[in-house]
Amino acid sequence: MTKLSVNINKFATLRNARGGNMPDILKVAQDCERFGADGITVHPRPDERHIRYQDVIDLKPLVTTEFNIEGYPSKGFMDLVLAIKPDQCTLVPDPPDAITSNTGWDTIQYQSFLKDVIGTLKAAGIRVSIFLNADVSKVEAAKTAGADRIELYTGPYAEEYAKARTQPQNFQLFNDYKNTAKAATAIGLDLNAGHDLSLENLRFFKLHIPQLKEVSIGHALVCDAIYLGLENTIQLYKRELTD
């Protein structure tokens, strides 16, 4: 079964809006695991507008499932990741002022940079995933850079899925995801996916890309939890990922 890693950034956004410690991010992570999450994802950004670097340090001894830290490999980020040694580090090409991730790596243009970063992470025993667009031409370079996995950036998929309900001709984009997934697994790269996946569009993605090892979901899951409750929501997402 494809694993569900819950991105808890939005819980930290809520906490930071008022100050104090409500909701308690450490308890949120533990509850997500207790409710069935297979992993916890955090994306600390330089301005610490949601997850703070100290949160990551505090979470390390508490997370008992897979701990995934994602972000742009700046010096501060790399120092944090190497100190924490999570199960997985997902490299994302976000500029510091990005509201949210909005594209994958150009693994050809940044091949040398990625090789250096990935080599450092893997020497520390950390599995490395590269955030990638649905683009077959960038897959081989992800492998030669040393990545263990790619994480398909599913923002465009989510947008096209909504359109395709009334305009099926707009869904041609999904072939790019299927082809990229096939190309990755053919050369030994495992496959993750994330960004704007939801209860509405997750099942279709999983059914048509059975190679999927893991999805990382935050924003939609937190929004659903407001209405449905966190425990119920996590179980609903896991149900969508069953084979």
Image: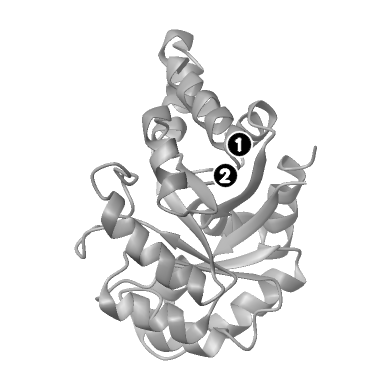
Q: Which mark is residue 185?
A: 1
Residue lying at 54% horizontally and 59% vertically, measured from the top left? 222
Q: How packed is label 1: few (under 14 Cα within 10 Å), some, or many (20 or more)?
A: some
Examine the rendering and report whether any part of residue 195 can be seen: no
Q: Position of residue 233 (x, y in %)?
A: 68, 55
Distance (Cα) linking label 2 and label 1: 5 Å
Amino acid on which the number 2 mark rests in the picture: Leu
Residue lying at 49% horizontally and 47% vertically, measured from the top left? 151
Residue lying at 49% horizontally and 30% vertically, measured from the top left? 180
Q: Residues at badges 2 and 1 in contact (C-beta under 8 Å)?
A: yes
Q: Determine whether the residue tagged by mark 1 lies in a helix, strand or loop.
A: helix
Residue lying at 30% horizontally and 50% vertically, measured from the top left? 111
Residue in the foreground of this view, choosing between 225 and 148: 148
Q: Position of residue 24 (x, y in %)?
A: 54, 84
Q: Which mark is residue 29?
A: none
Amino acid on which the number 1 mark rests in the picture: Thr
The residue where tag 2 is placed is: 189
Q: Is residue 195 above or below residue 23?
A: above
Residue in the foreground of this view, choosing between 229 and 221: 221
Q: Position of residue 65 (x, y in %)?
A: 70, 71
Which residue is at the far top? 169
Q: Determine whether the residue tagged by mark 2 lies in a helix, strand or loop.
A: loop
